[in-house]
Image: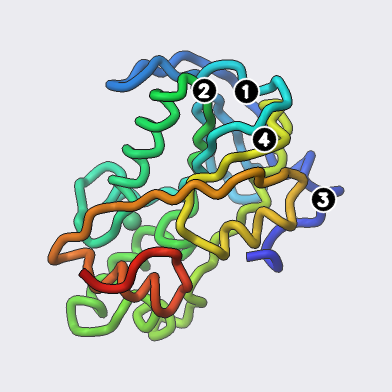
Amino acid sequence: MLSNNPPAENQEQVLEFVDSCQLPTTWANFHMHAFFEPATGKEHIALTLGEVADGQPVLARIHSECLTGDALFSQRCDCGPQLEMALQKIAQEGRGVLLYLRQEGRGIGLLNKVRAYHLQDDGADTVEANQLLGFAADLRNYGLCDPMLKHLGIQSLRLMTNNPRKLAAMAGLNVTVAEHVPLIIERNQYNNRYLNTKANKLGHLIQPDL
Ligand SMILES: [Zn+2]
C-alpha cells in the first residue's frame, strides 16, 4: 500500500546489504543476495539470474513470504505455485529477479495467519478473517523494493503479478513497471474460494470462480 511505503529519502537506511552467494535450484543457478532490515530485525533476500543491471526491463516477481504456501505445500492459497512459476519463467528467459520479502500472511505474521485460517475454517473469507482479527485486508509494504532494486542496479521491471494494488504500490517507488505479466494458477477445491475473494474483494486480475 502506498501509505506504508517509507519516504524516498529514508530508504537508504531501511535496508543493509549483507552478502551474496550462488543458489542452485531445479531450474537455474541463481545468485542470492541477503539484506537486513534494522527496524524490524527481518532478513530479506533477492534471487537474480543473468545480467540485470544493464538498464533493460527485468522480468520480476515481488513475492511476500507465505510459509504455508511456499514451503509446506498448502493449497489454501496460490503462493507456492506462483513462486514456482515465477522462478521457472525467470529460468526460461535466463534473466530476471525475485524479491522475497519477509511479510508473512499479507503482513500480519504467521501466528495471526493461523488464527485467520481458523476463522476461515469456521466460514469467514480471507478478508473477513483479517478484519475480525483487527487487521486491514492487506498490510504489506513494498517500500523495501527500492533499496533492493537499487542495490541490484535494476530500474525497470516486467512485473509478474495479478495484484493491481502491487502495481499501484510500484508507482510510488523509484522503479518503472514496463510491462505487467499475469501469473495464472490452477484452481483446486481448497483455493477456489480464496481466489474468488481475491478477485471480488481485493481486485485481483484473475477470473472469478471455476
Ligand atoms: Zn499463501
Q: Nearer the viewer, mark 2 or mark 3?
A: 2
Taking the image as shown, residue 133 lies to the left or right of residue 189, namely: right
Q: Which residue is mark 3?
A: 8
User: Is 152 above or below relative to 202?
Assistant: above
Local packing at callout 2 (Cα closer than 10 Å; few below 14, some 14-19, many 20+) is some
| Mark drawn on residue 123 | none
User: Is 176 above or below relative to 27?
Assistant: below
How far apart marks 1 and 2 lie (CA) works out to 7 Å
Local packing at callout 4 (Cα closer than 10 Å; few below 14, some 14-19, many 20+) is many
Residue situated in front as seen by the camera: 95 or 118: 95
How far apart marks 3 and 1 lie (CA) works out to 22 Å
Residue visible at 16% across and 65% down in the picture? 190
| Mark drawn on residue 52 | 1
Q: What's the amino acid at mark 3?
A: Ala
Q: Which residue is mark 4?
A: 149
| Mark drawn on residue 95 | 2
Q: What's the amino acid at mark 4?
A: Leu
Q: Are marks 1 and 2 in contact (CB under 8 Å)?
A: yes
Give the mark nearest the N terminus, 2 or 3: 3
Q: Nearer the viewer, mark 4 or mark 1?
A: 1
- Element class at badge 3: helix
Residue visible at 71% across and 38% down in the picture? 147
Q: What's the amino acid at mark 1?
A: Val
